[in-house]
Amino acid sequence: MTYEEARKEAEQILKGAEVPDAALDAWYLLEYAIRKIEKKETGRTWYLMNRKESILPGTLLYYQELVSRRKQRIPLQHLTGEQEFMGLTFKVNEHVLIPRQDTEVLVEEALNYVRSGMDILDVCTGSGCILLSVLKLGEKKCRGIFHGTGVDLSREALQVAEENAGRLQVEATFLHSDLFAEVQGQYDMILSNPPYIEKAVVETLEEEVRIHEPRMALDGGEDGLDFYRKITAESVQYLRKGGRLLFEIGYDQGEAVSALMKEHFAEVRVIQDLAGLDRVVCGMYNKRVVENSSRTKM
């Protein structure tokens, strides 16, 4: 069997199992199998030049095993153990959410505010992709030094984040904490991509997400806003004056999350993603806004 025949066979198997992007996944898994077994750096050019060659038995066997697991709707990224995000490669597994392109909007917005010497906190850090991307790219942008802390309730997720920090050669602190429970000190920026999917909706998600990604990183409560309420209210104790809070949100949560933040923050804005959907809400901490809000409630 040639490389091309193996790929086409895998594509048909995945299509038959109604796997999304079957052709693309068949290609990625073949590329991964060749790198893993044959230790070759592959790509489209390599494939075009070698597609008529016979695939090595060991590569074929491993490739078929990967395809069989993908057929069971195990995410592609769990099979390869990696995901690209902001031009960087992150380790992922079943203990963390797979970084998604939508989340890059949050990182890009955060980079608009970075300056040397900042203290940055990432709440619900997961794989660490948000915090580590901001630290890595912010250092390059400002040629400065940043202090970053990521917190998560999952110890397994924190292990992944620490490994990613080592891979990227980024210094960061990771803390086991239920939101701010173990957090001390004050920060110039707080970032978070919290669980924001409505509890009832979680059960309707595709198998790759519903079964194979951590439920605690998805479920945002009955209306999806539980974590936004908690983080927004508590964050003011940990932000310096003029500090920023930035959230990733669901496409239909811009108005609700903005309303929550306006009780505590000034300059609240909603930023859209490339598809034109609401994706990030950010605001600046201003003590007077909090005080005025308190008086109004009284």
Image (cartoon, helix red, strand yellow):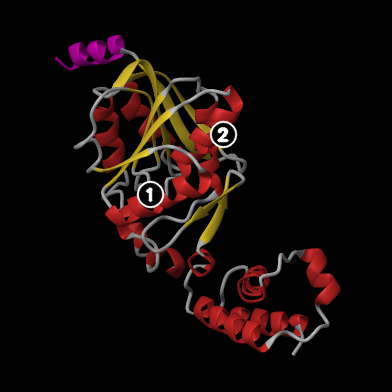
Left or right: residue 56 versus residue 200 is right
- Graded by Cα atoms within 10 Å as few (under 14), some (14 to 19) or many (20 or more), the crowding at tag 1 reads many
| Residue in the picture at 40% in, 37% down | 172
**In which image quadrant can residue 267 be found?**
top left
Q: Is residue 245 magenta?
A: no
- Residue that mark 1 sits on: 126
Q: To which residue does mark 2 refer?
A: 137
Magenta region, residue range: 287-298
Q: Give the foreground label among 1 and 2.
A: 2
Depth check, front residue: 279 or 213: 213
As shown in the figure, which amino acid type bears the numbered disc 2? Leu
Q: Earlier in the sequence, mark 1 or mark 2?
A: 1
Q: Among all residues in the image, which is located at the extreme right?
A: 49
Above or below, 149 against 57 in this view is above
For residue 26, side relative to residue 114 (left or right)? right
Q: Secondary structure at mark 2?
A: helix
Residue in the foreground of this view, choosing between 175 and 10: 175
- Where residue 203 sits in the image (x, y, percent)? 35, 64
